[in-house]
Image (spheres, helix red, strand yellow):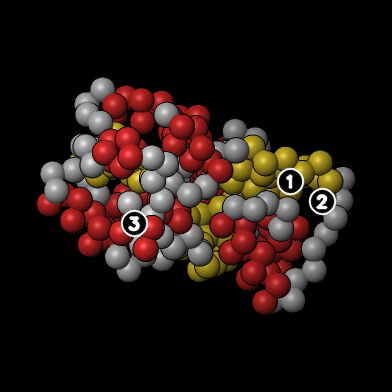
Amino acid sequence: NGVGAKAGILFKNAEALETAGKAQIIALDKTGTVTKGEPEVTDLIPAEGIAESALLQVAYSIEKLSSHPLADAITAYAEEQNTSALPCDGFTNLSGHGLSGTIGGEQVYAGSLRFIQSKINVREDVERKTDALASALADAGKTPMLFTKGGKLLGIIAAADTVKDDSKEAVEELGDLGVRVVMITGDNDRTAKAIGDSVGIERVYAGVLPSGKSDIVSKLRSYGKTAMVGDGINDAPALTA
């Protein structure tokens, strides 16, 4: 227990320490656990007829009200570009899905492609192009975020998080101990797989809502003693499970 304390590791009690030593499966969150949790904006792709500045201004106006690391990335980038924020009313954080609000009397949505498709109607050719762009960004390990205003697609902003320097080594060491490592994330399949592959995690559960993380942990427990590692509010149900 003393050695753990020197390394910044606290155990609730002796029983918790003993139980941790018997873990057969480790479930890792992605953002802030496998990665540094400090994403940066990598791509700004406005829709046809939309100026980059208009896309960034709407994105900044709604994302600055969120505390998610991806929102922090957009906020930091927008402020570097001296972008001014517009008043955003009725802000709602739809946990695991995206954001909504009203800017200039028009409904604004921000989130994944699946979330945006459920909120607005997009022309078939535009949808195909957007889907291809989002997929290409995700394959590169980036997280694409789409923005709409007044039922119109404004474009995509992508951000990438950096894998922690010792994540791959940690996964390998756990494997050497005979512990199976999986990753659970709310990010899309392609981005999650790219991150998982880079650190040697074969089993990745992607597109999982906060409530779904606890369901997966409960399922994993049927295969062996399971430990959950996470750092965010969204991980609370899974950590409790």
Residue with the mark numbered 2: 88
Numbered tag placed on residue 2 in the rendering = 3
Res. 73 mark: none
The image position of residue 40, as x and y in percent, is 52, 67
Q: Earlier in the sequence, mark 1 or mark 3?
A: 3
C-alpha gap between disc 2 and disc 1: 9 Å
Of the pair 155 and 94, the residue shown nearer to us: 94
The answer to which image quadrant residue 204 occupies is top left
The residue lying at 13 percent from left, 44 percent from top is: 178
Residue 21 horizontal side relative to residue 107, left or right: left
Q: CA distance from mark 3 to mark 2?
A: 50 Å
Q: Is the C-beta separation of discs 2 and 1 under 8 Å? A: yes
Which residue bears the numbered disc 1?
Answer: 108
What type is the residue that disc 3 sits on? Gly
Determine the secondary structure under disc 1.
strand
Out of 18 and 50, give the one closest to the viewer: 18
In the structure shown, which secondary structural element does the residue marked by tag 2 occupy?
Answer: strand
Q: Residue at x 75, y 71 (%)?
A: 83
Say if mark 3 contacts mark 2, CB within 8 Å. no
Image coordinates for residue 56, horizontal then vertical, percent: 68, 64
Query: SS of the residue at dot 3?
Result: helix
Foreground: disc 1 or disc 3: 3
Q: Is residue 128 left or right of residue 100?
A: left
Labels 2 and 1: the sequence-earlier one: 2
Q: Earlier in the sequence, mark 3 or mark 2?
A: 3
The residue type indicated by label 1 comes to Val
Type of amino acid at the residue the image marks with label 2: Cys
**Residue toward you, 91 or 110:** 91
